[in-house]
Amino acid sequence: MFRFKFKKQVKPAELKLSAACGCNIGLVRGNNEDNLFFNGITLPSDNRGLSDTLYYCAPIADPVHFGVFDGMGGEALGEIASYLAATEIQELPRATPAAELVGALLRANEAICAAARSHERALIGTTAALLSVDPGQTHITNVGDSRVYRFHAGVLEQLSVDHTDRAVIEQHGLTNRKPRLTQHLGIDPADMVIEPAVCTQATLAGDRYVLCSDGLTDMVTEDTIAAVLAENLPPARCVERLTAMALENGGKDNVTIIVVAID
């Protein structure tokens, strides 16, 4: 008699999430304009990064939120923008469809614009890259050039959208400057309505996600990031390896990295 063995189906409620976060001021800048949201944890506006790697691990029941924010504006105002964006994520409800993430970014945009007016500055801004994981779906939302990647079946895929003028640079063969942002938080709606990019996927065991500021992607290639993730290291070890690589390659900017593993 033949006995068929059926592979056990993994139910959403059985999925476990483990995550780690690092934030380093880098080797060149004297201040840290990056901020983060790590399952309820943010940094104060005046910070020097994290002295230790943050870690979180639990079964996936309610949505778990993560975010990376890279501020701009100079004279400590970039720190204010990224801090305002990070604290706005704390107000997200427990049940969080993608529309709620977009709404949080739009509210953060209003708060940052108000801060710019109070400081009489034309530009205070920040990027934002968000990841929200629940038992069935994973939502990604971003504005600017901080990125979200998924490592799935051995392939690294960028899920966020770079809101930059890279296409213009490439079209004209310019090599003397970095692509400029075409969208970020801190744009007055009277001048332009920002349109956060949104991506929703199934929450699958085995997937790895990376959220990062350009302090990583300007210093470390995507092939190298993929190679580190392919080693199947714990998230904290991945964060520490990638941060070390960014510093070894120059550390020209603040480096914020969150690695999320679904198992």
Image (cartoon, rainbow, N blue to C red):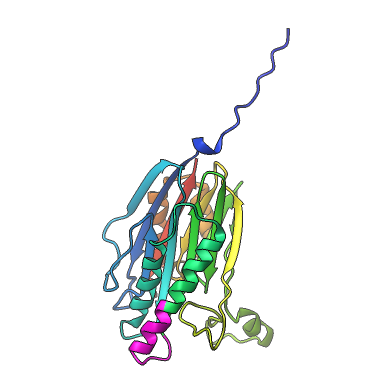
x, y percentage for residue 117?
38, 89
Q: Say if residue 231 shows up in the picture.
A: yes
In the depicted view, which residue is nearer to us: 185 or 221?
Answer: 185
In the depicted view, which residue is nearer to us: 105 or 156?
Answer: 105
- Is 205 magenta? The answer is no
Give the side of residue 184 with respect to residue 121, left or right: right
Numbered label tally: 0
Q: Is residue 25 above or below residue 38?
A: below
x, y percentage for residue 250?
39, 72
Tell which residue pokes out farthest to the right in this image: 1
Residue drawn at x 56%, y 78% as measured from the top left: 194
x, y percentage for residue 132?
49, 55
Dividing the picture into quadrants, the one containing residue 171 is bottom right
Give the side of residue 142 with respect to residue 254, left or right: right
In the depicted view, which residue is nearer to us: 42 or 245?
Answer: 42
Q: Is residue 59 above or below residue 181?
A: above
x, y percentage for residue 207?
55, 47
Q: Say if residue 221 shows up in the picture.
A: no
> Where are the magenta residues, as a range?
111-123
